Amino acid sequence: MTHETAPAHDFEAVIIGAGVLGGAIAVELARRGLRTLNVDKAPTAGAGSTSNSCAIVRFSYSTVPGVSLAWEAMHYWTDWPDYIAADDELGLITFNRCGQFNLLVGGDDHSATVRTLWEQLGIPFEEWTLDDLAQRMPVLDHGLYGPPKRPDDPHFWDDAHGTVTGALFSPDSGYVSDPQLSCHNLQRAAEAAGGEFWFNAEVTSVDRAENRVSGVTLADGRRVVAPIVVNVAGPHSAVVNRMAGVHDSMNIKTRALRHEVHHVPAPQDFDFMADGMVGADDDTGFYFRPETGNNVLIGSVDPTCDPREFVDPDDYDTSLSQEQWEAQVLRANRRMPSLGVPHEKRGVVDLYDVSDDWLPIYDRTDLNGFYVAIGSSGNQYKNAGAVGQLMSELIAAVESGHDHDASPVVMTGRYTGWEIDIGFYSRNREINADSSMSVHG
Ligand SMILES: Cc1cc2nc3c(=O)[nH]c(=O)nc-3n(C[C@H](O)[C@H](O)[C@H](O)COP(=O)(O)OP(=O)(O)OC[C@H]3O[C@@H](n4cnc5c(N)ncnc54)[C@H](O)[C@@H]3O)c2cc1C
């Protein structure tokens, strides 16, 4: 029997993608009693952009909903075994709650915005003096070198023109040990609630009957019939939106942005795994976190001097570039002079699914039954648990007739009880001028 004549497979919801967001959405929908199917073109859960995530959990966003969602979502990581509530033969992830600091550069910068929001929302933090900083992170130089520059800028190695004033420290921040494993944990949790996962299963068509989604067709010809389809395709979100015919009708669009993260051995005089923490430095333009084997993982905070490489998600350069390696590792050396520059480049290249204002889109679309959890802009790994709840409440409300566009659904966070207006993440918002327009969100 060919696929054409084979009967279609019936589900109540199809989730395109089995990354961290697709997995978390599956958990919630399956626990609501829906027969869910995650389809992913990759061979295993979390093999897309989640696999290369730095998996940093922090609350330093630029808006009240941004901070609120991240704070709510942190509780999923601290409560992981109970939240997953299923056996996973690969084991469960661990959340390393090592804390995070943001250097205070002075003036009206991102850290100043964050401090105001944390005070407003009651997010625990400490304000460190330079002495505190020296005691907690003795490997740091306190000079002011900004704004961030590229190494070929003649002023890159200029002397400091002052000092940072201290740091904001958030003790509840940290990172997840193994982002891909977290997706496997989510898969097992969804399966325990009746969800199914198909791998090596590429969606090539989002099907519709009049103005309602009717399912998807896979590259091998299999057809899946379902009244609900959720696009959680990460950097391929725009490709899938075009398949569904909703790309043009959304005010906010998404694009794949190439990004590099570099791995270097920690300074010899510092045990980064035991004493290090997550750090963000807007003065030189990088962020970092401890990495297994006493390494430091170095990312970019997207300073405006860096070129933005929007790419075709199916055709881009996956090798580390010498220019970006030097930019990020030398910036890190300005702040950590004993770090050094290894001869061999090490790190990962992957894609952010960036929205026009670097805030995600969690919404319905103009095609009834077709939903999107996209535009995660390099900063939504940490939010996965809460996004699962958000999307399942949105879908349940809209499917029972609620007009979310006219009267946005408000979610009450499962752990904090905080209210989060899902309309903030609308596909039809104007560009949010409060956004950092960077990975800070
Ligand atoms: C280098 C890097 C560092 C990051 N660091 C952090 C961080 O420190 N903290 C943080 O919070 N966030 C971070 N992020 C962002 C975070 O990792 C993402 O927001 C998150 O992983 C997105 O998850 P997802 O499930 O939406 O996407 P993905 O994990 O990309 O999953 C999408 C899946 O869809 C599948 N797919 C695509 N098209 C199709 C199709 N047609 N048919 C079937 N399947 C399809 C793909 O195979 C893929 O598995 C980082 C991202 C990157 C790239």
Image: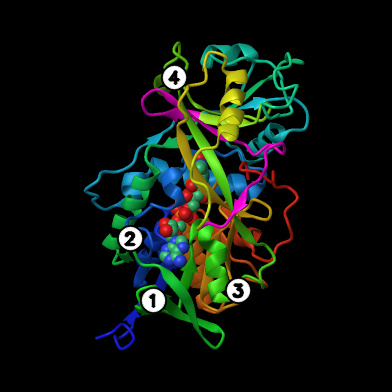
Which numbered disc, 3 or 2, marks the residue closer to the eye? 3
Residue placed under numbered mark 4 in the picture: 275
Which element type, helix, strand or loop, lies under badge 3? loop
**Label 2 vs label 1: CA separation?**
14 Å
- Quarter of the image where the C terminus is located: top right
Amino acid at the residue labelled 1:
Glu
Which of the marked residues, 4 or 3, is nearer the chain's N terminus?
Answer: 3
Q: Are marks 3 and 1 in contact (CB under 8 Å)?
A: no
Does 357 lie within the magenta span? Answer: no
Residue nearest the observer in this picture, 150 or 376:
150
Which numbered disc, 3 or 1, marks the residue closer to the eye? 3
Which of the marked residues, 4 or 1, is nearer the chain's N terminus?
Answer: 1
Residue placed under numbered mark 2 in the picture: 190
Q: Which residues are magenta?
A: 289-313
**Label 3 vs label 2: CA separation?**
28 Å
Q: Residue at x 52, y 47 (%)?
A: 317
**Label 4 vs label 3: CA separation?**
48 Å
Amino acid at the residue labelled 4:
Asp
How far from the left and from the top, in percent, is residue 235? Answer: 53, 56
Which of the marked residues, 3 or 1, is nearer the chain's N terminus?
Answer: 1
How far from the left and from the top, in percent, is residue 230? Answer: 48, 68
- Quarter of the image where the N terminus is located: bottom left
How far from the left and from the top, in percent, is residue 7? Answer: 30, 86
Within 8 Å of ligand 1, the CB of disc 4? no
Mark 1 Cα shell of 10 Å, populated few (<14), some (14-19), many (≥20): some
Residue placed under numbered mark 3 in the picture: 246
Mark 2 Cα shell of 10 Å, populated few (<14), some (14-19), many (≥20): many
Which element type, helix, strand or loop, lies under badge 1? loop
**Label 2 vs label 4: CA separation?**
36 Å
Residue placed under numbered mark 1 in the picture: 12
